[in-house]
Image: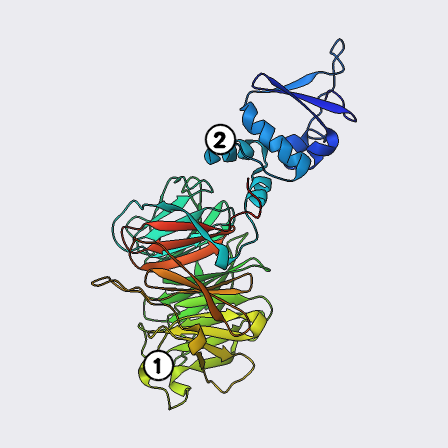
């Protein structure tokens, strides 16, 4: 290097830049620029006859390099109005600075400040199955037997095809790995779930279910990923209508546990799974309209028991059957409750600290419902993020805040049809509409103009 302790010179696309080792250190050791400070990564030493102020030549865009170098110096991102966002992001990826750019561009995620920044048309007509946000700001959309994958620039990668097998659910293990559950076996008979490369669509691993020392054929349904112990949970249905919950290791792909549902149990073919880190339990929910009686329980794999449960069959007789039909559910660990939504757009809250089984319906949290004439309805979905509660209803997403979950704002655009699914991750909210798979991208604007 020209001067490990003093100034460092770069020639980027013919333009000279000078900086210091302290500035480059802000890039992080795993970035290209930060690695220049590490002898194990950069063993290059000045050769005899080379000037002390020798420069590094990088054949890249000098205007983008100037923006990125200023970000390392000041911690602020100032982008010229004539510089395309995709160009800057591409260059940031090359230098390993994309995380710094994204952190500087986006403010703290706030559902009340989200702005619509893009709408992406799908590749196939009709309703999508699911949309899932990736950890890096991209997303994937499941549709029929296909999963379409988009990176952080919303450019589509090679789609993942399951050879005409219906996709049931999908989730990100990390930015490079996507787990998919399918209605039938993947490929030629090695189970109903697999891990695929998000960039190439290559199948990396198939999951097996073993019970009573026998490999079982199964259909995989709802998925959940444990964040602290690197587990994958999936609802499983056998050929003879046996039900259970399988558990696999995210890293090795090996089955580590299985809960077989005995006859008469209420878990059934679960529609929703959610791992609760604090309780070390899995929330399992079977919901209307697939079943007449809804069931929600907390499954503890340590002793293979359901240590808390609620069923609409056990709620107060003052509620009509329609009022008790739950369409979606999500656990809120901070408030020790489970939020549910029914077909009348009401939000209800079940106390996890009580086994009384009652639902507290909140009129102040009623969803906004704006259904256009002749428009097909979609069942509502729920999500939580940064202490806020989100729920879709027809063509909008409602945001609720505070201890009483009061409606504070609604996200909506003028076309696209009803929202069949939405997901939050990578500081973005993705909303999938039922009309030709179009999905919206919402972001929190930065606090300062860039």
Of all residues, the one furthest to the right in this rendering is 5
The N terminus, quarter of image: top right
Q: Earlier in the sequence, mark 1 or mark 2?
A: 2
| Residue 300 shown left or right of residue 140 in the figure | right
User: Relative to 29, is 423 above or below?
Assistant: below
Position of residue 152 measured from the top left corner of the image (x, y, whole percent): 47, 42
Instruction: Judge by depth and name the residue closer to the eye, 336 or 41.
Output: 336
Secondary structure under tag 2 reads loop
Instruction: Judge by depth and name the residue closer to the eye, 356 or 323.
Output: 323
Residue at (42% x, 70% y) in the render: 244
Mark pair 1, 2: CA separation:
53 Å
Of all residues, the one furthest to the front in this rendering is 449
Position of residue 195 measured from the top left corner of the image (x, y, whole percent): 45, 50
Name the mark nearer the viewer: 1 or 2. Answer: 2
Secondary structure under tag 1 reads helix
How many residues crowd around disc 1 within 10 Å: few (fewer than 14), some, or many (20 or more)?
A: some
User: Relative to 76, is 230 above or below?
Assistant: below
| Residue 438 shown left or right of residue 195 in the figure | left
The C terminus, quarter of image: top right
How many residues crowd around disc 2 within 10 Å: few (fewer than 14), some, or many (20 or more)?
A: few
User: Relative to 71, is 414 above or below?
Assistant: below
Position of residue 8 measured from the top left corner of the image (x, y, whole percent): 71, 23
User: Does residue 143 appear in the picture of this structure?
Assistant: yes
The residue that label 2 is drawn on is 83
Residue at (65% x, 30% y) in the render: 33
* Residue 228, quarter of the rendered image: bottom right
Residue at (74% x, 13% y) in the render: 47
The residue that label 1 is drawn on is 323
Position of residue 442 measured from the top left corner of the image (x, y, whole percent): 44, 51
């Amino acid at each position: 290097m020209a001067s490990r302790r003093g100034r460092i010179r770069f020639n980027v696309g013919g333009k000279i830049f000078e900086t210091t080792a302290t500035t480059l250190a802000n890039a992080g050791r795993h970035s290209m620029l930060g690695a220049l400070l590490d002898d194990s990564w950069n063993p290059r030493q000045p050769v005899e006859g080379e000037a002390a102020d020798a420069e590094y030549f990088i054949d890249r865009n000098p205007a983008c390099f100037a923006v990125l170098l200023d970000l390392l110096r000041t911690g602020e991102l100032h982008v010229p109005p004539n510089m395309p966002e995709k160009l800057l992001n591409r260059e940031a990826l090359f230098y390993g600075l994309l995380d710094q750019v994204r952190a500087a561009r986006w403010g703290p995620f706030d559902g009340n400040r989200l702005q619509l920044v893009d709408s992406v048309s799908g590749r196939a007509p009709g309703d999508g199955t699911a949309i899932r946000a990736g950890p890096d700001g991209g997303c994937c959309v499941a549709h029929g037997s296909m999963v379409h994958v988009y990176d952080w620039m919303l450019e589509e990668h090679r789609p993942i095809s399951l050879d005409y097998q219906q996709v049931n659910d999908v989730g990100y293990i990390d930015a490079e790995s996507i787990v998919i559950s399918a209605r039938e076996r993947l490929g030629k008979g090695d189970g109903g779930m697999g891990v695929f490369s998000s960039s190439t669509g290559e199948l990396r691993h198939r999951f097996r279910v073993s019970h009573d020392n026998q490999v079982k054929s199964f259909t995989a349904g709802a998925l959940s990923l444990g964040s602290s112990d690197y587990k994958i949970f999936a609802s499983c249905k056998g050929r003879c209508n046996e039900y259970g919950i399988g558990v696999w290791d995210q890293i090795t792909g090996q089955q580590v546990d299985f809960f077989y549902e005995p006859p008469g149990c209420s878990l059934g073919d679960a529609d929703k799974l959610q791992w609760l880190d604090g309780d070390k339990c899995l929330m399992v929910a079977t919901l209307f309209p697939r079943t007449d009686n809804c069931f929600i329980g907390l499954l503890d794999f340590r002793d293979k028991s359901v240590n808390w449960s609620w069923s609409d069959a056990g709620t107060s007789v003052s509620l009509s059957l329609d009022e008790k039909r739950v369409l979606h559910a999500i656990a809120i660990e901070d408030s020790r409750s489970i939020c549910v939504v029914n077909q009348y757009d009401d939000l209800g809250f079940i106390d996890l600290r009580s086994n009384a089984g009652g639902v507290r319906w909140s009129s102040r949290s009623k969803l906004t419902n704006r259904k256009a004439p002749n428009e097909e309805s979609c069942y509502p979905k729920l999500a939580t993020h940064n202490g806020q509660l989100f729920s879709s209803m027809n063509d909008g997403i409602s945001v609720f805040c505070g201890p009483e979950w009061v409606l504070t704002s609604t996200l909506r655009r003028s076309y696209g049809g009803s929202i069949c699914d939405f997901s939050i991750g990578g500081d973005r909210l993705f909303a999938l509409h039922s009309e030709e798979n179009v999905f919206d991208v919402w972001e929190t604007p930065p606090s300062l103009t860039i």
